[in-house]
Image (cartoon, rainbow, N blue to C red):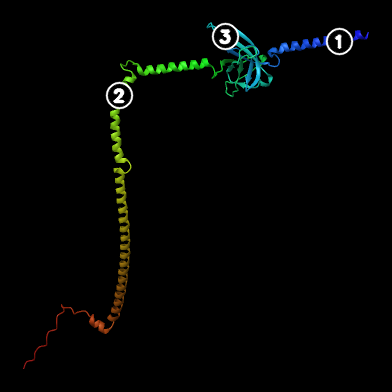
Amino acid sequence: MKKKLEVQTIIVLLCVLAIAGAWIGIQITKDSLGVWSEAAEIEFTTPDLLGLAPRSELQCAGATIGHVRRVTPSIGEDGQARFTLVGGIKKDFTGWKFAPVGIVKAGVVQSALAPSSITLGLSKSPQAVQARIPKDGPPPVLPLEKEKSKNDLGEVIEQYRKLGDQIDVTIRQFTEPKNGRSQSVMQELSEAIPAAAISLRHVEAVTATLQSQVGENGKIDQTLTSLNASLGRIQTLSDEATKTVSNLNGKVDSSLNKVNGLLDETTGTMTALHTKLEGFGGTFVGRMLIAKPEDSTKPSPSPPPKKSR
């Protein structure tokens, strides 16, 4: 009886474990494409899948922010292949804004264990995009570009080939006649160089002449030095003339002061004399001295008549 109970218990436990495992498996299967954990979506379009596949990682700032959920191939109107990829973004990154282009980073070994990944860059520009939950509207659509690798030998060869073509075109522009000309640029230069050399010699001669005129210790410098010396002498003469005029002004002022003193003394003397003369005229002597002469028109008295004998 006890043994039978133990067997039944084991069977029940195995059933419970089987049911739990089945439920966990179903949940894992349902969320294998990130339906729950990566609810927000971003779409990508590209003419070359570049090794991408479902569950390829979406990365930003070194973090895995989501995965490619599904890939839908199609043929465009131009007959070229087109691929539409739906990427799921984890809830923690739904508020991030990304640059409007995805960069495909190829795996070191293209396999199911090392598929390519998509790198998104953060952006603050008005063109930045943000993942969107399908119920809130259609997700943004971004183009995909392949990452430029410095170690890609094919790209290096292609760049050198393009550079060689550009060099070849440039050489032909200089060595072949263009725009209806009968000579190429190199031929015109070969003819123009001798004339340019002659012109250069003329320029050198003119430069030497100008150097002798305006260069250091040239004629203009010497003339300026002479003018400065003359100006110095003129300034010295002007200073001496100013001193002389100042001395003359002082002497003239002194002489005028002396003349003014003499005039004042003369005026005082004349005033005193005039006063004395006025006092002297009031005396008898003064009246005698300053008496008026008799009028010559007055008839003189006739002499008395002589007595007869």
Picture quarter with the N terminus? top right
Q: Disc 1 marks which residue? A: 10
Q: Disc 2 marks which residue? A: 192
**Relative vertical location of residue 41 with respect to residue 266 in this rendering, above or below:** above
Picture quarter with the C terminus? bottom left
For the residue carrying disc 3, how many other residues have a C-alpha within 10 Å: few (<14), some (14-19), or many (20+)?
Answer: some
At label 2, the amino acid type is Ala
Which is more foreground, mark 3 or mark 2? 2
152 vs 9, left or right, is left
Disc assigned to residue 82: 3
Q: Position of residue 81 (x, y in %)?
A: 56, 7
At label 1, the amino acid type is Ile
Of the two numbered discs 3 and 2 on the same chain, state the one appearing first in sequence.
3
Number of on-image labels: 3
Outermost left residue = 309
Task: Give the CA separation, mark 3 to mark 2.
Answer: 58 Å
Q: Which quadrant of the structure image shows residue 34?
A: top right
Q: Residue at x 30, y 24 (%)?
A: 192
2 vs 114, left or right, is right
Task: Give the CA separation, mark 3 to mark 1.
Answer: 56 Å
Q: Residue at x 40, y 18 (%)?
A: 170
Q: Residue at x 26, y 84 (%)?
A: 284
Query: Closest to the observer: 81 or 295?
Result: 81
Question: Which secondary structure, mark 3?
Answer: strand
Question: Which secondary structure, mark 1?
Answer: helix
Marks 1 and 2 in Cβ contact (< 8 Å): no
Q: Residue at x 36, y 19 (%)?
A: 174
